[in-house]
Image: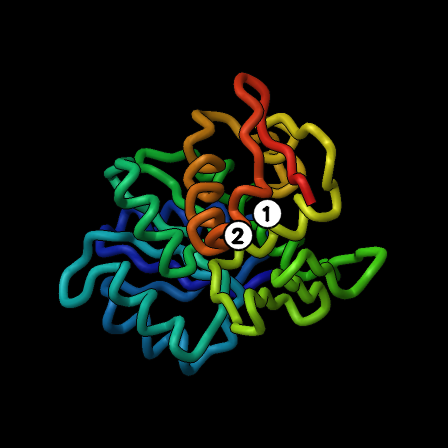
């Protein structure tokens, strides 16, 4: 199904992920350090990367920054730390998902499948371009413009904004957003969603206020 690059300095972790991935008919390429992963990502047609944070030679965050210079391949970060700072840092450099060790291999496979299904699905909308004052969102090109200047956001932030626009004026619970945008029944805390909303609002500048927090419920896009 997918060609997965698994990057982790712990052989047991790589073997565990590979075992489950191959069981589901995926092809796996393994790497034990961040430096090597850059070369592998450049020279192979990788569908998705599973990247550990703490590794010798080059850490996962630095490796992803280098990979993002030539590829938009989806990335799931693995880390023994679950602090908000690490999550935000990962999302800011374009990580699609963040998994804290120890993790369920089955859940990881579900996350991979959900990310790939979203990526391969064409975004449908009534109009190709959404305009609100000086905010312009091009659905087909997956681009955001403010005052005619392009705004770069992480892939997940694109998906969230497009989802909000398609459901503008509707009160959306956190559970519904996670289910619709993440593509699976999310379990655990909802800080992941709130962190992405925080980053998206920051990138949208004054238009971030269009995303209204509904206390105790979720969010609504006042487009």
**Residue placed at 32% from the left, 59% from the top?**
7
Left or right, 112 with respect to 81, comes to: right
Q: Position of residue 172 (x, y in %)?
A: 66, 30
Q: Is residue 69 above or below residue 201?
A: below
Q: Dot 1: few (<14), some (14–19), or many (≥20) neighbours within 10 Å? A: many
Give the distance between the C-alpha atoms of the residues marked 1 and 2, in whole angstroms: 5 Å
According to the picture, the residue beneath numbered tag 2 turns out to be 157
Which structural element holds mark 2? helix
Whether residues under marks 1 and 2 lie with C-beta atoms below 8 angstroms apart, the answer is: yes
Q: Position of residue 39 (x, y in %)?
A: 33, 79
Q: Is residue 114 above or below residue 34?
A: above
On residue 12, the disc is none
Left or right, 99 with respect to 206, comes to: left
Q: Position of residue 48 (x, y in %)?
A: 49, 61
Q: Which image quarter is the N terminus in?
A: bottom right
Q: Which image quarter is the C terminus in?
A: top right
On residue 160, the disc is 1
* Foreground of the two, 97 or 113: 97
Which structural element holds mark 1? helix
Looking at the image, the residue that sits furthest to the front is 133
**Residue placed at 46% from the left, 78% from the top?**
44
Q: Dot 2: few (<14), some (14–19), or many (≥20) neighbours within 10 Å? A: many
Which image quarter: residue 34? bottom left
Q: Is residue 142 above or below residue 190?
A: below
**Residue placed at 58% from the left, 51% from the top?**
115
Looking at the image, the residue that sits furthest to the top is 216
Numbered label tally = 2
In the rendered view, how is the structure colored? rainbow
């Amino acid at each position: 199904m997918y060609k997965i690059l698994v990057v982790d300095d712990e052989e047991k972790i790589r073997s565990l992920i590979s075992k489950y991935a191959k069981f589901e008919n995926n092809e796996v390429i393994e790497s034990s350090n961040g430096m090597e992963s850059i070369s592998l990502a450049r020279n192979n047609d990788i569908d998705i990367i599973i990247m550990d944070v703490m590794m010798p030679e080059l850490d996962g965050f630095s490796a992803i920054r280098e990979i993002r210079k030539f590829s938009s391949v989806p990335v799931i970060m693995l880390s023994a730390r679950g602090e908000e700072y690490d999550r935000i840092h990962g999302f800011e450099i374009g990580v699609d998902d963040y998994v804290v060790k120890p993790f369920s291999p089955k859940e990881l496979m579900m996350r991979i499948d959900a990310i790939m299904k979203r990526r391969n699905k064409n975004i449908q909308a009534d109009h190709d371009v959404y305009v609100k004052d000086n905010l312009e969102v091009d659905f087909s090109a997956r681009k955001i413009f403010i005052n005619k200047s392009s705004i770069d956001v992480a892939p997940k932030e694109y998906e969230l904004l497009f989802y909000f626009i398609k459901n503008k004026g509707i009160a959306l619970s956190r559970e519904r957003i996670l289910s619709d945008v993440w593509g699976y029944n999310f379990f655990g805390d909802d800080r992941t969603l709130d962190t992405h909303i925080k980053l998206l609002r920051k990138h949208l500048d004054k238009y971030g206020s269009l995303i209204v927090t509904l206390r105790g419920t979720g969010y609504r896009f006042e487009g």
